[in-house]
Image (cartoon, rainbow, N blue to C red):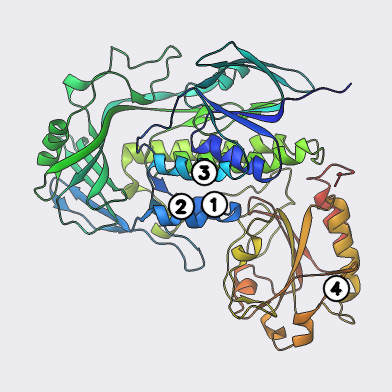
């Protein structure tokens, strides 16, 4: 039986997570509608921190430059306890990581993603909300309600709920959402101050009570603009929403609260108590009261319906993990949905979304709650591991049904993030590239690394079969690139033309040896890099490599993936 679909995917919610999902789907040619009940973007700097891994996501999508030009760097944190300066925390990542930490107010993140989505002819349908849905084996029937006009019924292949902590999609699926709430309430404010603290540093100033617990706190995160910060602090009793409208109808107290918000004088009172230097707040753009819960769903989806972002996990804003985690939820799901819409996905690929992302959500919820209670400075991990985890560079999917077993050995294994590296040169361009330059806007990539691939080499004799396997097993969706070992740099003929299966392959020389070092590629090796920048497989180049590659791709693509 054939079914008429109004669109391939409906995305409910147009925050950063929903916009990422819609943009990735449209970039891959999937028809998509995205709706949001709000009539316009909110001008609030709610989520601010941008992690290095999120910039890597945006790099692969092709919008990193726009975000980089709008953001400001985050260099570290000044910490004060009872007015006494503590050791400064400096934010840093290893030199091979292409991006640092940054701050970008959520309204700017949404603007950039919204404009990027518009390049593909899709606009957010604002003032339109999802009110209900039903699903069957072939699709999802959704009821939409616009601000004006009758309800609309939409038939779609898949539904993605990026509709926040009070998600209609999550409730419609009947997903569990267990957790708790913090008793404390916080004020948020977007203001300017006239202090002379170095730019690019956050400020955390705390007061300890007689029992040694924190009883007063001020956190200031830089925003674009001279002296501008997103500040958070405890709510005074007269502004508390507890007992009034603190809990929504679903009992979840999380996010911005209604009621009278703070005024500039409320912010100044806290600054007078906790600022390490006398300062005056001015030019306030907005304020609100914010409450925090910590919850996670028992499943990230059911059938043809999925949840991502705050619809799946909510937690303290400690370490700026929430929005970044949600963006990566959406990115992980989108490439899999695109294959499913094309009829090219293995039947278990979409189930891998829950298998890969729910453990990440569980870890983030647990860690942010622990940091909120005990302080990040008391984390037992060594500083470098803590920094890499906060940067979300240690997120991995080992054990996923869609990747090969990790096995033993040095370097990244299947399920790990594929690291960037510098010093790749081609036969024409007169400048070196990074590996992420080669991967940008590509989907599935087979990277072959070795000293020689030309006719007569051990690898060259099996290259045709390996390339043919990559293309046939993926339905033509996998690209093949060669990375020559540094020792082969002088071999101009090998650099210039390498053909396989009747096609000239792109060739790069690992002139600095960084690829070989970071990937621990001492022997000729094939690396399968997924669209989301993770290794799917790591295969020694040998006569059995084509068979091993086909077995891996059979976990991702349908048995006869259409072109």
**Pointer 1 and pointer 2: residues touching (CB < 8 Å)?**
yes
**What element does badge 3 sit on?**
helix
Which residue does the image show at 32% across and 50% down from the upper left?
A: 224
Q: Element under label 1?
A: helix
* 1 or 3: tag closer to the N-terminus: 1
- Binning the other alpha carbons within 10 Å of mark 2 as few (below 14), some (14 to 19) or many (20 upward) gives many
Nearest to the eye among marks 1 and 2: give it. Answer: 2
The residues tagged by marks 1 and 4 sit, at their Cα atoms, a distance apart of 32 Å
Q: Is residue 45 above or below residue 144?
A: below
Q: Is residue 544 visible?
A: no
Depth check, mark 4 against mark 3: the one in front is 3
Secondary element type, mark 4: strand
Pointer 2 or 4: first along the chain: 2
Q: Place residue 417 in its image quadrant.
A: bottom right
Residue 426 shown left or right of residue 56 in the figure: right
Q: How many discs mark residues in the rendered view?
A: 4
Task: Give residue 63's position: percent from left, percent from top.
Answer: 54, 53
55 horizontally vs 141: left or right: left
Q: Which residue is mark 2?
A: 67
> Mark 1 sits on what residue?
58
The residue singled out by tag 3 in the image is 115
Q: Give coordinates of residue 393: x percent, y percent.
A: 52, 54
Q: Earlier in the sequence, mark 1 or mark 4?
A: 1
Q: Which residue carries the number 4 mark?
A: 499
Q: Which mark is residue 437?
A: none
Crowding around mark 3 (Cα neighbors within 10 Å: few <14, some 14 to 19, many 20+) is some
Marks 1 and 4 close (CB-CB < 8 Å): no
């Amino acid at each position: 039986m054939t079914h008429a679909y109004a669109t391939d995917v409906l995305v409910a919610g147009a925050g950063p997570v929903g916009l990422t999902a819609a943009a990735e789907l449209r970039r891959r040619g999937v028809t998509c509608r995205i709706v949001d009940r709000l009539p316009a973007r909110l001008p609030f700097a709610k989520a601010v921190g941008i992690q290095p891994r999120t910039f890597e996501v945006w790099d692969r999508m092709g919008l990193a430059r726009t975000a980089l030009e709008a953001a400001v760097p985050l260099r570290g944190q000044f910490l004060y306890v009872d007015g006494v300066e503590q050791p400064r925390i400096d934010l840093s990542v290893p030199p091979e990581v292409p991006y640092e930490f940054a701050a970008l107010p959520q309204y700017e993140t949404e603007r950039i993603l919204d404009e990027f989505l518009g390049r593909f002819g899709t606009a957010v349908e604002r003032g339109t909300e999802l009110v209900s849905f039903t699903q069957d084996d072939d699709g999802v029937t959704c009821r939409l309600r616009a601000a004006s006009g009758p309800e609309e019924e939409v038939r779609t292949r898949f539904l993605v709920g990026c509709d926040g902590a009070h998600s209609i999609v999550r409730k419609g699926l009947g997903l569990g959402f267990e957790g708790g709430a913090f008793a404390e309430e916080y004020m948020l404010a977007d203001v300017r101050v006239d202090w002379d603290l170095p730019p690019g540093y956050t400020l955390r100033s705390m007061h300890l009570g007689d029992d040694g617990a924190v009883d007063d706190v001020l956190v200031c995160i830089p925003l674009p603009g001279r002296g501008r910060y997103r500040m958070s602090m405890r709510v005074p009793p007269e502004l508390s929403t507890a007992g009034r409208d603190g809990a929504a109808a679903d009992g979840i107290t999380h996010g911005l609260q209604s009621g009278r918000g703070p005024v500039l004088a409320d912010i100044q009172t806290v600054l007078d108590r906790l600022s390490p230097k006398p300062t005056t707040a001015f030019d306030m753009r907005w304020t609100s009261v914010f409450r925090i819960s910590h919850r996670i769903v028992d499943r990230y989806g059911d059938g043809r319906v999925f949840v991502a972002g705050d619809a799946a996990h909510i937690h303290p804003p400690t370490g700026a993990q929430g929005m970044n985690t949600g963006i990566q939820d959406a990115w992980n799901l989108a490439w899999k949905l695109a294959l499913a819409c094309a009829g090219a996905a293995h039947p278990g690929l979409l189930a891998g979304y829950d298998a890969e992302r729910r453990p990440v959500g569980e870890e983030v919820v647990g860690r942010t709650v622990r940091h909120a209670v005990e302080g990040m400075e008391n984390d037992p991990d060594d500083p470098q591991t803590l920094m890499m985890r906060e940067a979300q560079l240690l997120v991995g999917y080992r054990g996923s049904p869609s990747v090969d077993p990790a096995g033993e050995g040095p370097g990244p294994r299947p399920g790990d993030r594929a690291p960037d590296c510098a010093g790749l040169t081609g036969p024409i361009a007169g400048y070196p590239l990074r590996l992420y330059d080669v991967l940008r806007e590509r989907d599935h990539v087979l990277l072959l690394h070795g000293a020689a691939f030309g006719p007569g080499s051990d690898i060259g004799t099996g290259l045709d079969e390996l390339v043919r396997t990559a293309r046939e097993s993926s339905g033509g969706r996998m690209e093949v690139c060669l990375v020559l070992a540094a020792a082969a740099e002088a071999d101009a003929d090998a650099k210039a033309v390498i053909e396989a299966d009747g096609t000239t392959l792109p060739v790069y020389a690992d002139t600095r040896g960084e690829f070989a070092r970071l990937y621990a590629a001492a022997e000729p090796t094939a690396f399968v890099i997924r669209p989301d920048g993770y290794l799917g497989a790591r295969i020694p180049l040998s006569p059995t490599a084509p068979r091993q590659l086909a077995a891996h791709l059979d976990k991702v693509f349908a048995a006869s993936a259409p072109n």
